Image (tube, grey):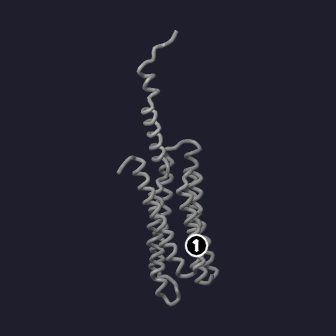
Amino acid sequence: MTSIPSHDDDAALDPRLAAQILGDGGRIGDRLSPDPRILFGVWGIAWFVGFGALWTTARTATDVQPAGWAFAVFYALLATAVVVTIVHVTRRSRGLRGTSATTGSMYGWSWLVAFTVVGLVLGALGRADTDPAVMGIVSTALPCLVVGTLYMAGAATYRDWSWFALGAWIAVMAGIGAMTGMPSIYLVMSVAGGGGLLVGAFACHVAGRRGRGRP
């Protein structure tokens, strides 16, 4: 016997309802994935201000070495960016289950592991009486390379090409900055590295507003 279509059947086939469900699912996914505006923004500020302070003091010093207060500012901002990244990624991962939750947590903690190792390597170079110019280049390029690599890894984890493009940009700028030597590397990483991150944060913000239909 053929059944008479009910109102519920019509609703289930309503394209507008299906589009709304898909849209809600996308917004839920956005809330569970790391917000690139936060990650790009916090690292952009840390690098733009931190490297800017290093370059400002190094270019006026006779030995091309930044002032102690500039290093203090830079490393404080760097530590803040690492903590914000770990907290943000792990909190977003709490809303996930199974493999996705594990992946998010592993990615968040990989930042702490990577920068702990960076600190150990730089400490070893310092104890080995490394030439100050070499130490300046390595201590700048190495953390930037790590950040760029982690962003590209995050792109593979969350399937986000904007992360990959920005990570590749940071890694390339670290290489170019190293080639310019001291103290120009600080300026390159401040303007191109930190500035690029801030531009990326703004672009993600604009794209997000357009995706939600805001003017």
Q: Is residue 122 above or below residue 6?
A: below
Residue located at (45% from left, 60% from top): 201
Q: Nearer the viewer, residue 60 or 10?
A: 10
The residue that disc 1 covers is 141
Taking the image as shown, residue 94 lies to the left or right of residue 116, namely left
Q: Nearer the viewer, residue 112 or 55?
A: 55
Q: Is residue 195 above or below residue 137?
A: above
Residue 120: quadrant of the picture: bottom right
Q: Is residue 74 visible?
A: no
Residue found at the very far top of the displayed protein: 1
Residue located at (39% from left, 51% from top): 209
Secondary structure beneath label 1: helix
Q: Whole-percent x and y of residue 150? A: 58, 60
Q: Residues within 10 Å of mark 1 (few under 14, many from 20)?
A: many
Q: Is residue 153 above or below residue 133?
A: above
Taking the image as shown, residue 10 lies to the left or right of residue 158, namely left
Q: Whole-percent x and y of residue 57? A: 46, 83
Q: Nearer the viewer, residue 133 or 197?
A: 197
Q: Amino acid at mark 1?
A: Ala
